[in-house]
Image (cartoon, rainbow, N blue to C red):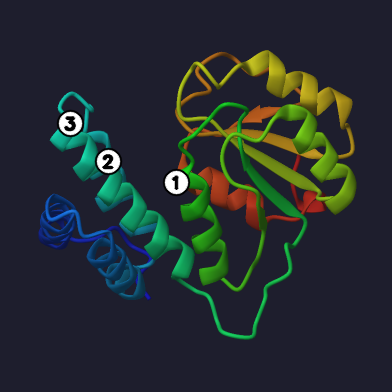
Amino acid sequence: MLTEPMPAEAVEAGRKRLDAAAEDLDANQVAALVLELAAEVGVAAVWQQVCVPLLGAFHGQAAAEIAVEHALSEGVRIGLDVHGRERGRQLPPDGVLLAGAEHEAHCLGLHALAAALREQGRGCLLLGPALPWAALASAVARARPHTVLVWSQSPHTGRAYRLVRFGRDLPEVRVFGAGPGWIEPVPPPSVRLTTFAAALAVCRTPPHLTHR
């Protein structure tokens, strides 16, 4: 499997194929294409070079465009969630918990992270979008992860003070904010991750091998 960036012509072809499937409102075809590309070049390349630019091109102005965006998002989510799964084999969470910030409805980035981890033979506990902070704290108490990564897509949900407070309340857990919503400075003990590669790295690295 390739680890280098996709060639420009492959990126362009991939975007055109996914865009055409989304225009047909065919989420299943979008998912099939995501799976095909991920098998060829890996999740990280497909997510960063194909999916993110396509999703970012939508502005949600017209009803028809919103429908196409939903078809694309749903297809990408399905493809990412299927990639790397083996029937009868459930990967352990490896001490990593992923969740969307409170009121955050968009967390495809978490599905991409989970798929990239499975691709490397690792697991995680993915709790999906819009998890209230109190529910996240409860999940941490039950699952006892060593790493918690909270995704925010919008500044409306990426409130740094909530992330920092959460980290201070749970000093035994590494707490990270990922996604473009965390635009405010994040003082310790929590950490803001600015790239997909950085988010994947912290999920892969045991706490005793990192320095806060």
**Mark 1 and mark 3: Cα distance apart in space:** 21 Å
Q: Classify residue 80 by image quadrant.
A: bottom left
Query: Closer to the N terminus: mark 2 or mark 1?
Result: 2
Q: Which residue is mark 2?
A: 55
Residue 56 in sight: yes
- How far from the left and from the top, in percent, is residue 151? 56, 36
Q: Are marks 2 and 1 in contact (CB under 8 Å)?
A: yes
User: Which of the labelled discs sits on residue 108, or is there none?
Assistant: 1
Alpha carbon separation for disc pair 2 and 1: 10 Å
Among the two numbered marks 2 and 3 on one chain, the one whose residue lies closer to the N terminus: 2
Foreground label between 2 and 3 = 3
Is residue 183 shown above or below 15?
A: above
Relative image position of residue 56 (x, y in whole percent): 26, 35
Foreground: 3 or 114? 114
Q: Which quarter of the rendered picture does the C terminus lie within?
A: top right
According to the image, label 3 marks what residue? 63
* Name of the residue lying farthest toward the front: 63
Residue type marked 1: Leu
Q: CA distance from mark 2 to mark 3?
A: 16 Å
| Picture coordinates of residue 190, whole percent (x, y) | 72, 27
Q: In what element is the residue under mark 3?
A: helix
The residue nearer to you, when weighing 26 against 208, is: 26
